Amino acid sequence: VFPHPVQGSAQVDVIGFPISQQVTIRVENLLGQIIMEQLVEVDRSGAATLSVNSNLRAGTYLIKAHSQAVHLSRKFMVY
């Protein structure tokens, strides 16, 4: 997540996924409620990108990214 902590909008770059696969990127609050979810395509470098808008309230969130073979999860904060 860049920038971190987030104020306004942010860009999420996830790497390490097989090329030409689709990745589901999900933003959840700490209660497990899905705030945002999007299916994105992995580019030739093995990365997928999602832009997160400024509609998120201040707090801590989880970014979860998964494909058939890879699962990632990271926390980020919004001020």
Image (cartoon, rainbow, N blue to C red):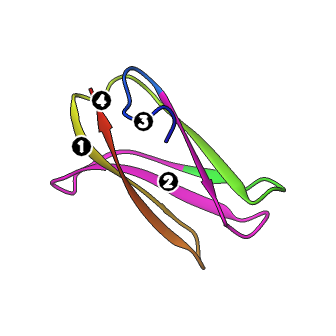
Out of 30 and 75, give the one closest to the viewer.
75
Type of secondary structure dominating the magenta stretch: strand
Amino acid type, callout 2: Ile
Q: Mark 3: which amino acid?
A: His
- What's under tag 4, amino acid-wise? Leu
Residue 65 spot, x, y in % from top left: 49, 60
Q: Earlier in the sequence, mark 3 or mark 2?
A: 3
Secondary structure of residue under mark 4: loop
Residue shown at the point (41%, 62%) measured from the top left: 73
Label 2, on which residue? 25
Residue 16 drawn in magenta? yes
Q: First in sequence: mark 1 or mark 2? A: 2
**Residue at image coords 36%, 33%:** 5
Q: Quadrant of the C terminus?
A: top left
Between tags 1 and 2, which lies in front?
1
Is 16 positioned to the left or the right of 25 in the image?
A: right
Report if residue 31 lies within the magenta region. Answer: yes
Instruction: Kindly identify which numbered label has been placed on residue 56.
Output: 4
Residue 33, horizontal then vertical, whole percent: 22, 51
Provide the residue designation for mark 3. Answer: 4
> Residue 67 falls in which quadrant of the image?
bottom right
Work out how far the residue at label 4 is from the one at label 1, CA to CA, in angstroms: 10 Å
Q: Which residue is mark 1?
A: 60
Q: Is residue 50 above or below residue 54?
A: below
Q: Give the magenta part as a residue range.
A: 10-38
Q: Bin the neighbour count of mark 1 within 10 Å (Cα to Cα): few under 14, some 14-19, many 20 and up.
A: some
Name the residue at the front extreme: 4
